[in-house]
Image (cartoon, grey):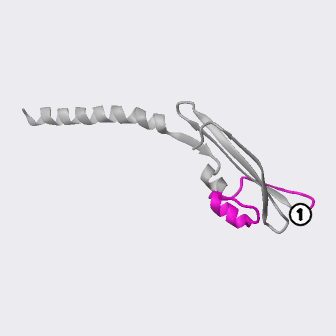
Amino acid sequence: MNKMNLIGRLEMAEMRKLLFILPLLFLTSCMVIGPVFHDEDVEKLEAGMTEQKVIEILGAKPTARSKHSDGSYLLQWIYNYVTDIGVSGGRHIAILFSSEGKMIEIKYQYQTGTGL
């Protein structure tokens, strides 16, 4: 077997691998907007925690903040995702804090899709 033929066969083998792997990469790619958090994170949250502790557990600063007239405020974490094959979903959690910055309760929680 000559040298050029061997190089051609090696290149063809590498090309076949690449043609197999590339579609798999596209099938598993995902676009996420917002900070991702999981059930295990939410289960750790307790009334009385500071805002900073909640942020630490959820792994990101809130997406939105609303202040109430009594000084309490609502922090919200929201994320959405979509994959290249059309699977989509998202999650939203809203947590009420006292004017002293302590968690009072989870006011709202919603999830669509299978989650990340």
**Residue 62, position in %: x, y?**
71, 56
Q: Position of residue 60 (x, y in %)?
A: 64, 58
The residue type indicated by label 1 comes to Gly
Q: Is residue 62 magenta?
A: yes
At horizontal 72% and vertical 61% (from top left) the residue drawn is 46
Query: In what quadrant of the picture does the C terminus appear?
Result: top right
Residue 80 seen from this side: yes
Question: What residue did someone put label 1 on?
Answer: 71
Question: Looking at this view, is 1 or 113 the one in front?
Answer: 113
Most extreme residue toward the bottom is 100
Asked whether residue 37 is in view, the answer is no
Give the residues drawn in magenta, as a range.
44-70
User: Which percent across, then down, holds residue 5?
Assistant: 13, 32
Task: Find numbered disc 1 in the image and state the secondary structure of the residue it sits on.
Answer: loop
Report the front residue among 10 and 55: 55
Quadrant housing the N terminus: top left
Q: Is residue 22 left or right of residue 41?
A: left
Pinpoint residue 87: horizontal percent, then vertical percent: 57, 33
